[in-house]
Image (cartoon, rainbow, N blue to C red):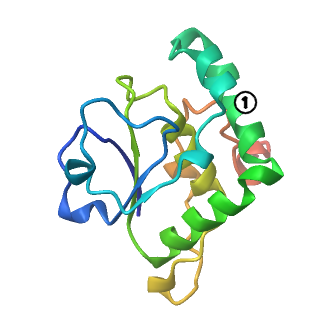
Amino acid sequence: MLRIKRIYAEPARDDGFRVLVDRLWPRGVSKERAKLDLWLKEIAPSPELRTWFGHDPKRWKEFQRRYIAELNAATHKEPLRKLKEKAADGDITLLYGAHDEEHNGAVVLKRVLERRRIPNRKTKGRIVKRSHASLRRSDSSFIPPPSALRPSS
């Protein structure tokens, strides 16, 4: 299972593999308290994008678009591969330092990873698909299944 969590929250047993996905180390958190398995700062939004966004909810939609474009660049292939590999092994928690729990890079990264098919080694390589019903209707990128587009008779 893939989760996101503020690094300031207490570590939990069910966190699994804990990965900090921010470029900057969070203030006031010691390395011992963070209990990190990996700091993957290269997967974070670029400094320019992070500065432009400034955690302004009005810029959220454009931030998502730009960050996804960065994630699709060749420079992010290896860090994404690392995360997908760890996710295939079991539970993984993406940690972030932002105060806003809805508008931050970890939210975008989680969505990107969930949309890319990740075989789970616990299910012997079978890919477990998310049903269309499980997607939030408020998600602007939601695409209904073809059956929903057919006119009813």
Q: Is residue 134 above or below residue 151?
A: below
Q: Position of residue 139 (x, y in %)?
A: 58, 33
At x 58%, y 9%, the residue is 58
Q: Nearer the viewer, residue 73 or 48?
A: 48
Query: What residue would you read off at disc 1?
Result: 65
Q: In the visual, does 61 lie left or right of 28?
A: right
Q: Position of residue 79 (x, y in %)?
A: 63, 58
Specify the farthest residue to the bottom. Answer: 124
Q: Is residue 90 above or below residue 9?
A: below
Q: In the visual, does 42 lie left or right of 151?
A: left
Q: Is residue 134 above or below residue 81?
A: above
Give amino acid for label 1: Arg
At x 63%, y 27%, the residue is 47
Q: Position of residue 125 (x, y in %)?
A: 58, 86
* Count of residue discs: 1
At x 54%, y 35%, the residue is 105
Q: Nearer the viewer, residue 2 or 16?
A: 16
Q: Quadrant of the N terminus?
A: bottom left
Q: Is residue 103 above or below residue 146?
A: above
Q: Position of residue 8 (x, y in %)?
A: 24, 37
Give the class, few, some or many, for how many residues have Cα within 10 Å of label 1's Cα (few <14, many ≥20): few
Which quadrant holds residue 144? top right
Tag 1 secondary structure: helix
